[in-house]
Image (cartoon, coloured by chain):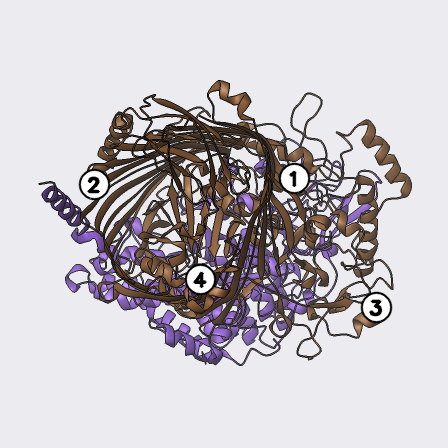
Chain colours: A purple, B brown
Amino acid sequence: MKGRYIIILFSCAALLGCDKDLLEKSPVTTLNPTNFWQDANEAEMAVNALYTFLPGIFTVYDDNNTDISVEPWSGGNKIINGQVQNTSGQVLSWWQSNFTAVSAANRFIENVDTVPAEEISDEMLARLKAEARFIRAVSYTFLVNYFGDVPFFTHELNLSEGSTISRTDKQEVLDFIEAELTEISEILPLEYSGDDKGRITKGAALAWKARAMLWSEQYEKAADAAKAVIDLGIYQLHPDYSELFHYSGEYNNNEVILEYIYTDVTGHNFMSRSAPYGITNRQGVGLSVNPTANLINEYETINGLAPADDPAFDPEDSYRNRDPRLQATIWLPLFEEGSYADTLWGQSEPLDVRPGSGTMDEVLSNNRGNVTGFMLKKYTNEEDMDNLNNSSQNFIILRYADVLLMYAEAKIELGQIDQSVVEAINEVRARVGLPGLEEKGVNINDQDEMREAVRHERMVELAMEGWRFYDIRRWDIAEELMNDGPATGMTYRDIATDEIMQVFFTDVNYNFQKMNEDYIYPVPWEEFNMNPNLLPQNEGW
Amino acid sequence: MKKNQFRYQLLFLIVFLTSPLFVPAWAQISSKVEIQGIVTDEDGVPIPGANVIERGTNNGVVTNFDGNFEINVSPEAVLVMSFVGFETIEIEVDGQNEITVSMQTSAAALDEVVVVGYGTKKKTSLTTAVTAIGGEDLAKQSSTGDLRKSLQGMAPGLTVIDNGGLPGENQIQMQIRGVSSISGSEPLVLVDGQVVQSISNIDPNSVESVSILKDAASTAVYGSRGSNGIILITTKKGKEGVLSINYETTYGFQEPTVLPEFLSTEEFFRFRNVLAANELERNPKSGLPTYTEQEIQGYLVAMEEDPINNPAAAYDLDDVYKPAPQSYHSLTVSGGGELVQTMINASYYQEEGTIWERNYERMNIRANNNITISNALSGHLNLFYQTAERNSQASGHPEFEAVQGVHNPRQQFALGGGVFYDEEGNYLPKAARNTNPRFEADTRYMGLEQEKPRYQSIDAGLNWEPFEDFVLSGSYSVQHNDNYTTANIPRFDVGFAKNNNNSLRYFNQDISRNTLNLLANYEKSLGAHNFSGMLGYANEEFRNETQNMYGQDFFNNEIRDISSGSQENININNNLNEWGLRSYFGRVGYNFAEKYFAEFSLRSDGSSRFPEENRFSQFPGASVAWRISEEPFWEDFSSIVSDFKIRGSYGETGSHAGVGNYDYIPQLGLSQRYGFTTGPGGEYTATTIIQNTMVADELSWERVVQYDLGVDISILRNQLNITFDVFDKTTEGILLSLPVPGVIGLNAANTNAGRIENKGWEFSADWRDNIREFRYNISAGIASVEDRLVDYAGLGVTPVNSEAMYYRWEGSPLFAIRGYNVVGIYQTDAEAQGSANIPAWEDQIGAGDYQYEDVNGDGIIDWENDAQLLGDRTPKYTYNLNLGANWRGFDLNMLWNGAAGVQTVLSGYLGEGGQWNNSPVSTYLRDNYWSEEGDTDVHFSRPLYRQSNNTEDSSRKVHDADYTRLKSLVLGYSLPSSVISRLSLTRVRIYFSGTNLLTLSELTRNWGIDPEDAPLSGAWQGLQGGQSNAARHIYPSQLKAFQFGLNISL
C-alpha cells in the first residue's frame, strides 16, 4: 500500500523536473536581431543609433590639446606636455571610438537590405544608407587625421579578418571619403520637414567634405566643396554670434549646418565640468577646461587691431572694447577694482578670482580647477544653473562661418586670392562689428598676410569649439606654439601687494611632440599587439 | 512560476507555524531506579559532555563538567555511553545504583563519517581529497557573524578573502586550491544537499559539519559546477531521546585592525619645504609655498588657540572610524520522539559599522524536522527563514574624504584637517572639497540606502528503503530570496555645500531557485567484497527578476512618490534572467576487505545557457586507494602506525561561472539616445537600436582536469593524524573576453580559449593528547598553490580589470603585478642624465630619482620592453596553526594563520612618496626618502610635486604582504556542576573571544595597512584618486573584535 503512494510521489516529482522549458530560456527583456529589421521604422531606429557617433559637446575639450586652453588636472595635458605614447589612453580611444562607428555603419548598411522591399521605399532606403555613409566618412576623416594609413573596409568584419587586416594608404581612404560624400550629397535632401529636422543634409555632406579635404591639405577640392555649400544659398551667418551657443539660438538660425542634438533625456553634464563655481554653486564636478591667456590676447580690439597695436587699449582694463566674441566665449575676470569684469549669472558682484579674493572661483585655490583664471561661457546656459548634469545644449559640428573660413583658407593656400576670399573673411568679421581686412590694414594681395589673417580669424571665431587641434597641425605650427614653459593665465593686480601679477599653471610644461611630418599619432600598442599586420608603427613613435 | 511564489510563501508560513505540532512530547521520563555515575577516560580523567542513554528509549542525559551523571531508568536497563573520539560502551544496570565507566579512546576515530557528494562515507574509505570540519571545531573559534569568515584558516587549501568590512557586506570570496578561472573561482556551496543562494546567513551554531571537497574525483559528481571545489554544509538535526536547549550570546566591539598614520602638522610643513625645493629644481616656475621655522612655530601656536581657522594637516583617522558594537543571540532546541525529531535554531545578529550611520541586523530561524514513518520510510522537512536590514549612506564617501583634499599644496597654510565641527556644532568643510568625512557619513545630507533582504527555503524529502541496502530518496526544495533596496538623496543647503536635486531609487529583486534531487543508493557486501552504487537525477531552475525605479526633483525630501518628480528624469527598467540545469549522474564503488578501493562516477549536465547542439556535456571521475596498513606485512608497524592509506584520483569538472544566460543569442540594445526636432521648441528623443556585443555562439563550459595523489596516516592509536596531498589541475578553454581588435567595433564576447595550470600541495597534521586533566590538541596545516596562465590565446599583456599595475600575459600568475624594476636611486644629476630613462621625463630627471632597469639594454626605458613581473597577489603559501586546551573548567583555543610569498601594490597617496595631489603624508615616508647624495638604501625617491619619473608604476610600489596573525583567541570557563546543577543546567560557560588581535606583517608595521586588505581587495588603492565611486567606498575589511560570550545548556 504504502509503496504505491511512494511510487506515485516519485513519479510526480520526476514529472515536475522534466518540464519542457527547463533548458529553453530566452531573453525576454532584450531585443533580438532575428525578429528585427521588419520595416522602415525599425531601420530608422537603427540609423538613429549611428548619430550618437557624431562628435558631441565634449569635442570642445579637444582645444585642451592646443595652446588656447588646458585641463586643470594632473595626468591631463599629455598632448601639450609631450607625454603621448603608443599606450596612451587617448590614442586608443581615438582608434576604438572611430572604428566602432565605422563598423556600426557597415553593419547597418549590410543589414538594412534585409528589410522587406514592400516595407521600405527605395528613396527611404537610399537616404538611410546615405546617413550611415556620412557617419562612416566622418569617422574615417578622423582616423586618417590621427593615424595616417589605417585599416579600410566597408563591410562587417569577422574576428579573423579583424585580426589580420592591414593598413590602406591614407590617400586611398581620403579618395573614398571624397567620393562617398560627393555621392551622398546627391542623395541627401537639402532640408528635412516634419520631425526629421536635425538629420544629415546635402549641405552637411558638402561641408564635411570641405573639412576633410582641408585637413588633408587638398585645397582645390576643399575650396570647391566649400563653394558648393555657399552656392546652396540656404545658409547665412546668424546675426547674434553669442546666441548660437545657447538654447535661444537652437533651430532658429540659418548658420548651423549640422549639430549634435541633445534632449532632456539624453542630456550631458558639460556645464557641470565647465562653468564657474559661482554659477554652479559648488555643485559642479570640477573644471575640465581653462582657456589660457594665449587665446584671450588673440582677440582684437573693437577697432580691428591687435591689442598691442591699438593705442586705445589699456592693459590694466583689457577686456573693454574688444572683439565681442571674447565676451561670448569666456567669463572675463577682474583685473583690479573698477576694471571691467563679467558678472556671473545670479551674482551681483563682478567676477573676482584673484588670489586672496576669497570667492568660490579663486584662481589656483582649490582642487576643482580654475588654474588660469579664465572659464568657459560658450555652450553653457543660465537656464541650466539648477540642472547641471542634464543639459540639452546642442553642439554645432558644422556651421556656415566655418565654411566661409575654410573656403578662404583653401583659396589662399592655392594662391587664388580674389575678392570672394576677402568677402568671406569680412563677412565673418562684419557679423561681430569688426572692420574688414583692408580697413584693418591687411595687404590682401600678400599670401602670407592673408594666411595670417584667416588663421587669426579661425582661432577666435571657432575658439573653444574643439577644431583648433586639427588646424595647428595642418598649419605646421603646433610645435612652435607649444615648446616651452607653463601655461599662462590672467593678469591681475595683487590684492595684498598691489603689484601686477600673472597666473602660471606649471603642471603644463609645453613640449608638443612633432614626431613626423604629418603630425600623426602612433597606432595603439594594444591594436598591433592583436594584429601584427598593422605594423610598421608610424614614423617617430 | 511567478504566480506560485505567493503560494510558496503561504505554504511556508503554515508549515512553519505548525511544525512544533509535529513534535510529540519528547523525553518522557519514567522514574524507576536512580543511578549516579561517572564517565572517565582510560586514565581516569572525567569526560564532560558524554551521552548516556537508556537503550531503546528516549531517555538520556549528558555528563556534567566533572563527568558525573544522574539518570532514572528501569532496573533491567542497558545504558549506552558515547562520546566523540571514544568507543561507545554499553553497560547493564543490573540493579546497580552507582556506575563508574572508563571509556577507551576509539581505535577508529576513523570510523567518523564524512559527508561527500550525494552521500556519506567512512573516513577510512575515502579515496578522494576531502577535509571535514566538525561544528564543534567551528564553535571553538571566535564569533564572526559569518560562516565563511569562520572557515578561514580551518582547512588547508581553502582560502577565504574578505573584501567586506562593511556591516553585513557580502564581499567575501572563497577559493579552493587557488584561482582556476578568470571568470570566478567561488566553490559551489550546498546546505543539506541543496545549492544555496547565499551562505553568509547560516548561523554557525546550527552547523553540524562542513565538508570541503577539493579534488576532481570528489567533485565530478557535481559536473559542470564542480571545478572550483565544493563545500557541503550539514545542519544539525534533532536526535531521538535527547532534549537539549542551548543558548549562546556574545557582545563585543570591533574596530579596524590598523590605520595609517600621518605626519604631524609641524612635520608636514617641513616636508612641504623639501618638496618645494625639489620641485623648484625641476621646474623654476613651480612657485610652491615654503615655510620658515618661525612661520611653522607661529602656525602651531595659532592651531593650538584656534584649530578651526588653523586646521591640522590631516585628520586623525581614529576620529573617522569608531569602535562598533556587535551582539549576537542564538537559541538551539533539539530533541524528538519516535515519530518526529526536530532541531530549531533561532538567532539574531546585529552590528554597527566602524563608520557612522552604517549598521546591519538579521534574524534567522531554521527548523529541521525528521519524520520516521516506519522502519523503511522516513522523511524530512527543513525550513529556513531570514530577514535582515542593512543601512548605509546613499551617497558620500567618508573613508575617501578622510584622506583626500585636506590641503591645498599651492597655497601657504591652506590646510583643512583635524576638525569636523565649528563652535555651534555645524559641519566645517575641509580646505577645498566643501565637505568633511563626518559630513559624508551623515545620512541627513548623503541620504540613506536601506537594503532589506529576505530569504526563505523549504526542503522536503522522503527516504524509502524497499528492501535492505537499497534506498530511494527524493527531495524538492524551493528557495526564495527577495531584496528590497531604497536609496534617497535629499535636497539640502548647508552653505558650503548644497544639493538641488533630491532623488529616490527603488530596487526590487526576486530570486527563486527550485531544485529537485532523486537518488537511488545500493550497498551490498558479499564476504570481503563490498559494492556500492548510486544513480541520480537532478534539475535546478533559477530565476532572477529585478525592477528599478528612479526619480528626482520632488517638492520636498519626505515625499516618496516617484511619479511626482520631474517627468523627464523618471527612469524605470526591469530585467528577467533565467537558467535551468538538468543532470544525470551515477557512481559505483568497490572495495575488497576495506583494503583496496576503487570508485568511478559520471555526470551529464545540460544547461539552458548553451544552444541545443552543444547543450550537454559529460564529466567523469575515478579514484583508487590502498590501505597498506591492512596488509598482513604491516602488522609489525601497526602499534605505531595504525593506519596508512595511499590514494590517487582523476576527474573532470566544469565551471558554471562566466557563461552568460543568453550569450549565444544575439541581442540588440534599445534605448533613447539621440534627438531630432520639428523646429524651435520641437526637440524630441528618438529611439535608437544597436548591437553592442559580439555573439558567443560556440561557447561551452570551462573544463578542469585534476589529478590528486594523497596519503592519510594515523599514528599512535590515532593521536596523530597526517594528511598530505599533491595536485595538478588544468583548466582548459577558460572563458576569456579576448580583447577584440578595434576594427570589429563591438564589445568582446567570451570565448573558450587559453589554459590555466594550478599546481600545489597540502599538508595537515593534528595531535591530540592529555597530561592528566590537561587535554590539548594541536593541528597545523600548510598549503601551497601556484597558478599560471600557460596559454593566453595569443594575447599580449592585458590589464586586469582596471586595477593599477595588475596585468596578465602568457606564463604569468593570474594576479600578476607588472612594472618597471627600480635598480636604485640616482645619487647625482650626472649619473641620472647619463643613464637610460623614460623619454617623457628625460630633461627633468636628476639626483634622487629612480633608476629603472633597462631590460633590453636599448638605452631607453619603455613599457613594452622594460616592464616586468614584479609580484603576485595570490599567496604562494598559506598556513594555519590551531592550539586547543582544556584544564578543569578552563578552555583555550587559538588559531594562527598566515600567508607567505604574496605581494601587493600601494599606489596613490601612500605609495607614491607623498607628492601626489593633496593627501596626507604617511609617517613611513618621512623617514624613507632620498634627501642627499649617499642615501642609497632609502625606499623613496626625492619628493616631487605631482607626476614625475618617480610616479611611474615600478617595483617601489610593490610590497611583500606576508603575514602571520592571531586570527582567533578564545578563553572560556565552564562553571562547576556543583554550582549549576542546582539550576538544572548542564552547562554554563563564559568566554572571551578575540579576532585579529595580533598581526605580524611588514605592511602593518610600516604603513598601517592590514595585509589581508591590501593584496586581495586593493582596498586602500581606491584612495589614490578615487577613480570611481565604487573605489571610494573602501573600507578596512579586516576588523579586530573583542567579545564576551555566555553559553547556557540545559
Amino acid identity at mark 1: Ala
Q: On the image, numbered disc 1 is attached to which residue?
A: B402
Q: Are marks 3 and 4 on the same chain?
A: yes
Q: Are marks 1 and 2 on the same chain?
A: yes
Query: Residue at the spot x=72%, y=49% of the render?
Result: B1005
Residue B269 is situated, as x and y percent measured from the top left of the image, at 82, 44
Which one is closest to the eye, mark 3 or mark 4?
A: 4
| Figure check: A2 above or below B858 | above
Q: CA distance from mark 2 to mark 3?
A: 90 Å
- First in sequence: mark 4 vs mark 2: 4
CB atoms at circles 2 and 3 under 8 Å apart? Answer: no
3D distance between C-alphas at marks 3 and 1 = 37 Å
Q: Are marks 1 and 4 on the same chain?
A: yes
Give the residue type at disc 3: Asp
- Determine whether the residue tagged by mark 1 lies in a helix, strand or loop: loop
Disc 1 from disc 4: Cα separation: 36 Å
Please state which of the two labelled residues, at mark 2 or mark 3, is closer to the viewer. 2
Q: Secondary structure at mark 4?
A: loop
- Picture coordinates of residue B954, whole percent (x, y): 67, 63
Query: Is tag 2's residue or tag 3's residue first in the polypeptide sequence?
Result: 2
Instruction: Give the residue number, with chain letter if any, for mark 2.
Output: B375
Residue type indicated by callout 2:
Asn
The spot of residue A93 in percent (x, y) is: 50, 63
Tell me the subunit letter for badge 1: B
Q: Quadrant of residue B196?
A: top left
Which residue is rendered at x = 51% and y = 72% of the image? B810
